[in-house]
Image (cartoon, helix red, strand yellow):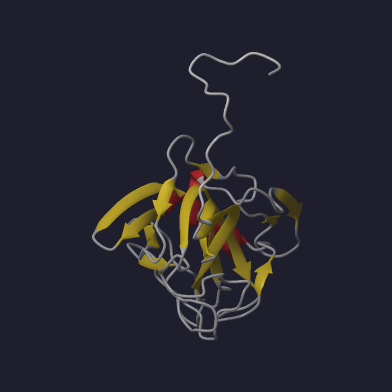
Amino acid sequence: MYGTLERGSTGLPPSVPFEQPKNLFRYGEQTLWSTQLHAGAAGAVSLANGTFRLFTTPLGQVGQGFTNALTIAETSLKEGGRVPAGIAYDVFGIACQVGRATSTGDSALGDANSTADSVRILSEIQTNGILTWDFTQTQVDIAPIQLIGAGGGAFGSVSISSEPQGTIGNMNNGAGSVFLYRKHPVALPGNSTFSILLRYGSRMGALAAGQDSTFVKVVLLGYYKNVIEIG
């Protein structure tokens, strides 16, 4: 026999189980997202003291301020308020994008915030909006939207306009960094029920009469563990 044996070693190869494993675990990173629409109307739309629930309306259904079915651009949920079956999901980060629609009502999303009213409502959502976890019987405040950025996008470009409002800006909150759970991610077991509340204080302003709609999109960044049955 060549070489030396470690103390306590028998020199025999390690034991191998006679049975094949019944399942495998697959790990990865995934995002989940959901969007709330504040639809503009002919009259002013009050948002003060409002509470809006995200991650409740799945793909292909109507809700969260939209009058048409949500598409993949608005949400990735296959089932409202639930993590996909068979997946344990740990959230380590949250992003929040605030933007403008092209018109009132349920219209195309993503227009530039280039009017005084659209810049004002963006600033007020950032200042007065709070995101909160809702786990059926338990609510946990996350942070003000001011601390939860989109992580990218157009922001801060300002130009002089001849329109009555004078100086206008093409802005959103994309300059903000993603909110991270630096030590302890939020665990969402498979099939668990959850939502995120978008809440405003009493000093939140209103959408002005005839103002374009505004949307708030929340993205969860996390790890998943999927159990794959093989036997």
Residue 91 in the image: above or below residue 112: above
Residue 30: quadrant of the picture: bottom right
Instruction: Residue lying at the far front in this picture: please name it.
Output: 1
Q: Residue furthest bottom?
A: 68
Q: Is residue 195 above or below residue 16?
A: below
Residue 104 vs 179, above or below: the answer is below
The number of discs equals 0
Camera-nearest residue between 229 and 40: 229
Residue 112 lies, in percent from the top left, at: 69, 64
Whole-percent x, y for residue 63 in the image = 45, 80
Q: Is residue 123 visible?
A: no
- Observer-nearest residue: 53 or 60? 60
Please tell me which residue is depicted at 71% across the width and 65% down the height of the picture. 163
Q: Quadrant of the N terminus?
A: top right
Residue 101: image x %, image y %?
62, 72
Instruction: State the residue in front, 75 or 10.
Output: 10
The reply, left or right, for residue 33 in relation to residue 185 is: right
**Quarter of the figure with residue 5:** top right
Q: Is residue 198 left or right of residue 49?
A: right
Is 115 situated left or right of 195 in this image?
right
- The location of residue 196, given as percent across then percent down, is 40, 60
Residue at 75% across / 59% down in the picture? Answer: 161
Whether residue 137 is visible, yes or no, is: yes
> What residue is drawn where x is 62% and y is 74%?
72
